[in-house]
Image (cartoon, grey):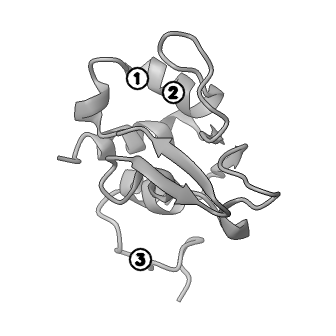
């Protein structure tokens, strides 16, 4: 049964941040959308909906993998323990929303540019801090 825009159902996630990470939906009902992202021959993840886990994996460690039709991408390890030396909260927001690396350069177009509010983004960061 669908619950709040996700087939996982009520209680499937321990936190809103975990829910957003896996489904790109918020328990607040706020819209989380994106532009860009992995695309190949006009396909984006087989026309599916992306979420953080789509590229960075269920454990947040990222890695090199295939997306769609023969596109290979190298997704960054986004566990907070791996990011904290390079990212703070604002730099992480800029990476997620504007596709900007901490040094000011643009991330590859594989990284979607997310429309996410500050409360939901804060919840994602809290979740990333729980990943070993």
Q: Is residue 105 above or below residue 24?
A: above
Nearer-the-camera pick, 18 or 54: 54
Mark-to-mark CA distance, 1 and 2: 6 Å
Name the residue furthest top: 103
Q: Which mark is residue 10?
A: 3
Res 114 quadrant in image: top right
Q: Is residue 24 visible?
A: no
Nearest to viewer (mark 3 / mark 1)? 1
* Helix, strand or loop under label 1: helix
Nearer-the-camera pick, 15 or 131: 131
Res 4 quadrant in image: bottom right
Mark-to-mark CA distance, 2 and 3: 28 Å
User: Does 131 sit left or right of 113 as displayed?
Assistant: left
Q: Is residue 31 visible?
A: yes
**Residue occupied by mark 1:** 89
Of the residues under marks 3 and 1, which one precedes in the sequence? 3
- Residue 30: x and y in percent read 62, 52
Nearer-the-camera pick, 122 or 33: 33
Nearest to viewer (mark 2 / mark 3)? 2
Circle 3 crowding by C-alpha within 10 Å: few under 14, some 14–19, many from 20: few
**Residue occupied by mark 2:** 93
- Residue 64: x and y in percent read 43, 48
Look at 29% across and 63% down and name the residue there.
14
Q: Which mark is residue 103?
A: none
User: Does 132 sit left or right of 27 as displayed?
Assistant: left
Name the residue furthest right: 42
Q: Are marks 1 and 2 in contact (CB under 8 Å)?
A: yes
Circle 1 crowding by C-alpha within 10 Å: few under 14, some 14–19, many from 20: few
- Residue 66: x and y in percent read 53, 58
* Helix, strand or loop under label 3: loop
């Amino acid at each position: 049964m669908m619950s709040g825009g996700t087939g996982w159902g009520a209680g499937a996630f321990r936190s809103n941040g975990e829910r957003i990470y896996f489904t790109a939906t918020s328990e607040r009902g706020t819209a989380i959308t994106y532009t860009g992202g992995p695309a190949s021959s006009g396909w984006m993840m087989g026309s599916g909906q992306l979420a953080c886990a789509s590229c960075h994996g269920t454990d947040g460690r990222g890695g090199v993998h295939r997306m769609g039709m023969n596109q290979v991408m190298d997704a960054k390890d986004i566990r907070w323990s791996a990011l904290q030396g390079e990212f703070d909260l604002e730099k992480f927001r800029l990476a997620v929303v504007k596709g900007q690396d901490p040094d000011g350069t643009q991330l590859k177009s594989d990284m979607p540019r997310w429309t996410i509010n500050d409360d939901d983004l804060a919840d994602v960061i809290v979740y990333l801090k729980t990943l070993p």
